[in-house]
Image (cartoon, helix red, strand yellow):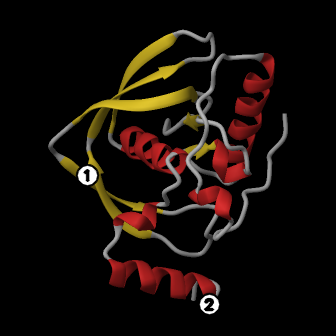
Amino acid sequence: MTARRCIPWPDKRLRTPAAPVDEITDEIRAIWDDMIDTMEAMPGVGLAAPQIGIGLRLAVVDASSERGKAVRMANPEILHESVQLRDHEEASPNLPGVSAKISRPRAVTVAFLNADGVRDRQDFVGLWATSVQHQIDHLNGRMYFDRLSKVKRDMLLRKARKGGR
């Protein structure tokens, strides 16, 4: 298990939708383990495989306060989202030094293949829900700042180019 390097924005792999995972193999489990190590090293509450240059629909999320509760997901898809929104300051290790307040549904129901290769369903609320949605954006070739207005997005990217000052 190893913490991997997050690829820097604007690497085109961050804009490329990830490929579906056909089955859960030992190789996939090893990638998840590395993703969890990488997430813990940041520290963060989630990570998608494209962030470390792997073009597969894999994500891990752990928004627990005690840590060690990571949910491993392959091919996650949102089945239901709450009408109520929640604002959260989001950031990405792929574009360090900047962040932005993003509004997302407060709760989501997500279907995914779990570590045993079984299709699972889980409800996520609060920071867990925010993180899952953030990771699914990455899997679809989107970054959190794509949810900002053009003016706010341009300001954030300008600030990032100046080193986050």
Q: Tell me: 101 left or right of 27.
A: left
Which residue does the image show at 65% across and 37% down from the upper left?
A: 56
Label 2: state its secondary structure: loop
Look at the picture and state if 42 lies above or below 9: above
Q: What amino acid type should be assigned to the residue bearing mark 2?
A: Lys
Q: What amino acid type should be assigned to the residue bearing mark 1?
A: Arg
Residue, disc 2: 162
Which residue does the image show at 54% across and 19% down from the upper left?
A: 113
Image coordinates of residue 20 in percent, x first then y, are: 58, 31
Q: Furthest-right residue in view?
A: 1
Look at the picture and state if 14 lies above or below 139: below
Front residue of 127/8: it is 8
Q: Furthest-left residue in view?
A: 83
Query: Which one is closest to the eye, mark 1 or mark 2?
Result: 2
Cα separation, mark 1 vs mark 2, equals 29 Å
Residue, disc 1: 86
Which residue does the image show at 48% across and 22% down from the upper left?
A: 112
Front residue of 125/19: it is 19
